[in-house]
Image (cartoon, helix red, strand yellow):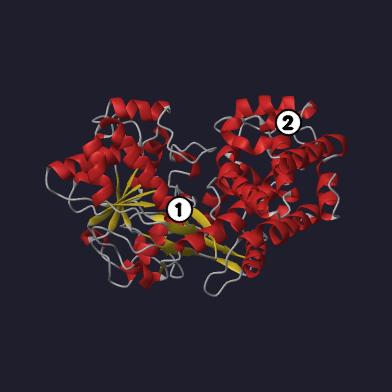
Amino acid sequence: MDELISLSNETLSRLPAAILRPHYDRSKLTAGIVHIGVGNFHRAHQAWYLHRLMQAGAAQDWAIVGAGVRPYDAVMREKFLAQDCLTTLIELDPSGSSAEVIGSMIDYLPISEGNAPLIARMVDPAIRIVALTVTEGGYYVDPATSAFDGAHPDMQHDAANPRTPRTAFGAVIEALRQRRDNGIGPFTGLSCDNLLANGRVMRQTVVSLARMSDPALADWIDTKCTFPNSMVDCIVPATGEKEIAQAHRFGIDDAVPVTHENFRQWVIEDDFCAGRPDWDQAGATFSNQVHDYETMKLRILNAGHQIIANPGEILSVPTISGCMSHPSIAAYFRKVQREEIAPHVAPVPGMTPQAYVDLIERRFGNPAIVDTTRRVAFDGSSRHTGFVLPLVRKGLATGNSIQGLALVEALWARMCYGAREDGTAIEPNDPFWDDLVRAAKAAREHPQTWLTQHHLYGDLAAQLPFAQAFDRWLRLIWSEGCEAALQAYCAGSKG
């Protein structure tokens, strides 16, 4: 393109004709949702569904107000406000790419200590849903027990300072206190993170934190607010210079474009205490079977990401599609999925577990999606405990093989050593990276020391079928290499 058009309300009419853009009057939109954690996934997923409703002339009073509680969010806010909170979504498919500008977010709240602007906006009676994408590890849950982690310093701070909280959950509680005291009524808390029973987890965190400082308020929240479970699915890479350049190829100067695959799914419990948009009219599904959809997606897709990202890092394969074109990694993925994961997944309407494995293979293998192994391997301490270890427990309980899942954990331990097999360094990639590196270095000679991280593995270190398999695999990885271990597993050997 000869001219780049800076994205704004005023320039929408000047965009190339092939680019979809809002044809509703954004100046007449009013807010109904506060969304905390305005990352790429939210904009490619939930914000898109709402935008599509608005394109049909609906949901004009449900616009999104973006928010955050981290210093990083202040930088994002500046970028969004400079372009009137518009976002370019770029769909990547092997057959070609397309672009669409969405406008369902109309404001982004300032970041401040004590979160006063966020709290004030959530107190507004027009806000009927508060949604979150704060990552799987952001809910203050003990990974070994799945219980609320009230001892975390953030939770201790917010319990001691409920009027000036540090966290999103503390802000939600203070807003609900003010709504209750002012006779406004509750709102729905909608988690959009990849957690099994994410609504239940959000309820646990909010109610448990409130109970630490105000038991009566905790009871009111537990009784009056709803926290629907939902399953969210769309592969959305991180944005960097490459993604900004892709927007430029469409003639758009967008500081925060989003690339995504040609697939979306959103399944939600219809449990909203203060109303909701008709997201089903834009392709979402309201269902009382959310648990089955969640289980299928988290066990096959999210655990599947961990299956391939760790060997990908060790073997210097930079992308997820590259992992799926690597013969040993792809064969390993397929065998673990079909033999050790799919048996623990129930079918959902229109999809069997084995058909879903085939679908995920195709989606992971999409070469147009440049999703990095580093991004997928990030925060393994949350993702392994959330996605992989529950499958280990299922396999142990049912007598099914857990050999491949034990190898997943051995590969994670090897990756956390901090160096690839070609000698290059793996940069810190977990909130607890230093602890993981120390454990990984000790485990090189004594594999069982990795499993003594009780906050991750709980009693699994004492489960001999798992502990012994892990020991054998990690020793094989260190003695003969990652690919030798993958091939041994696929050949049926236990190392």
Relative side of 349 to 369, left or right: left
Q: Between residues 217 and 371, which one lies in front from this camera angle?
A: 217
Label placed on residue 448: 2
Q: Amino acid at mark 1?
A: Ala
Q: Position of residue 367 (x, y in %)?
A: 67, 59
Q: Between residues 461 and 410, which one lies in front from this camera angle?
A: 461
Q: Position of residue 156 (x, y in %)?
A: 36, 26
Q: Which residue is mark 1?
A: 197
Q: Amino acid at mark 2?
A: Gln
Q: Position of residue 270 (x, y in %)?
A: 34, 64
Residue 363 picture quarter: bottom right
Decide: is 206 above or below 320: above
Q: Position of residue 251 (x, y in %)?
A: 48, 58
Decide: is 484 above or below 453: below
Residue 368: in sight, yes or no? no
Q: Between residues 187 and 59, which one lies in front from this camera angle?
A: 187
Residue reaching furthest left?
A: 182
Q: Between residues 191 and 5, which one lies in front from this camera angle?
A: 191
Task: Give the class, few, some or many, for how many residues have Cα within 10 Å of label 2's Cα (few <14, many ≥20).
Answer: some
Relative side of 69 to 474, left or right: left
Q: Residue at x 38, y 46 (%)?
A: 202
Residue 244: in sight, yes or no? yes
